[in-house]
């Protein structure tokens, strides 16, 4: 079946512009996650959506970052007024039962490589 | 400060040889530990998962070990193949917030013919 898909695969933008990154999770997965992977660093948690619950936004690095998930499926991560330090790979993941013990495996998309000039 | 440390940062091995990657963590209270494989330009893919009560788990030529007392894990790759060239990431989750994962920076493995 189809995995997690993300678009675009690459995005080059100028400092100060806004960007939108899209994630299509695996059908039926109720949980969706956004991560950021900077060069030489481990993945950094950004935000978590689970069903109709309020999202966990504790990982968003600043108020320039926001995300929404419409209809419990597709999600969009928006970065406003981009800065050079925002350059990274942004990964999306989804899982079926995040509240199970242990939590279900998170399935990752291929990521969007963002470059801010 | 990263709560998951991996070593070495990178290594090069010849095809057919074995190698072992290390992971030390300070995440507490600990729920489970996973090893992920990330090919260049791809998202990470889960290889193994171990809870605190398990001390070894295999997936083909990959064998992970866990010592929850010393908070150490290792991933052993047997009879390496060219397709094993990738970054291997150690991932730990909290018991209280299992969905929130702590990632190591990864070990980049290059297998040469």
Image: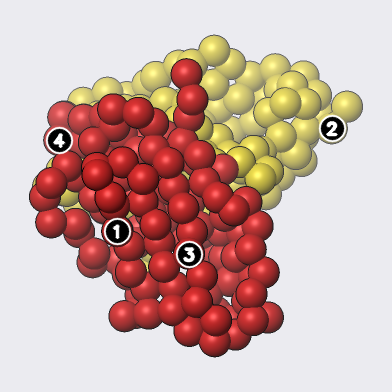
Look at the image and tell me whether residue A103 can be seen: no
Query: Earlier along the polypeptide chain: callout 1 or callout 3?
Result: 3
Count residues near mark 1 (Cα–Cα under 10 Å), then give few for <14, some for 14-19, many for 20+.
Answer: some
Look at the image and tell me whether residue B42 can be seen: yes
Q: Are marks 2 and 4 in contact (CB under 8 Å)?
A: no
Question: What's the image's color scheme?
Answer: by chain
What residue did someone put label 1 on?
Answer: A68
Tint applied to chain A in the drawing: red
Letter of the yellow chain: B
Give residue B112's mark.
2
The answer to whether A8 appears left or right of B89 in the picture is: right
What residue did someone put label 4 on?
Answer: A99
Q: Which quadrant would the N terminus of chain B be assigned to in this image?
A: bottom left
Task: Give how far apart the Cα atoms at labels 1 and 3 are.
Answer: 11 Å
Give residue B30's mark.
none
Q: Residue at x 75, y 39 (%)?
A: B110
């Amino acid at each position: 079946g189809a995995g997690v898909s993300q678009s675009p695969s690459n995005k080059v933008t100028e400092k100060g512009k806004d960007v939108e990154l899209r994630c299509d999770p695996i059908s039926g997965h109720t949980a969706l996650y956004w991560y950021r992977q900077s060069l030489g660093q481990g993945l950094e948690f950004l935000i978590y959506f689970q069903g109709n619950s309020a999202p966990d936004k504790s990982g968003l690095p600043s108020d320039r970052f926001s995300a929404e998930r419409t209809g419990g499926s597709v999600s969009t991560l928006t970065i406003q007024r981009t800065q050079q330090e925002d350059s990274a790979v942004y990964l999306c993941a989804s899982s079926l039962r995040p509240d199970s013990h242990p939590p279900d495996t998170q399935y990752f998309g291929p990521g969007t490589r963002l470059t801010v000039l | 400060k990263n709560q998951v440390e991996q070593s070495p940062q990178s290594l090069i091995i010849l095809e057919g040889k074995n190698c072992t990657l290390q992971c030390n963590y300070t995440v507490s209270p600990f729920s489970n530990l996973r090893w992920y494989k990330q090919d260049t330009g791809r998202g990470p893919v889960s290889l193994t998962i171990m809870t605190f009560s398990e001390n070894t788990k295999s997936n083909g030529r990959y064998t992970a070990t866990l010592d929850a007392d010393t908070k150490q894990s290792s991933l052993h790759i047997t009879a390496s193949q060219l397709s094993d060239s990738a970054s291997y990431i150690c991932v730990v989750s909290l018991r209280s917030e299992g969905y929130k994962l702590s990632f190591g920076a990864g070990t980049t493995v290059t297998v040469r013919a």
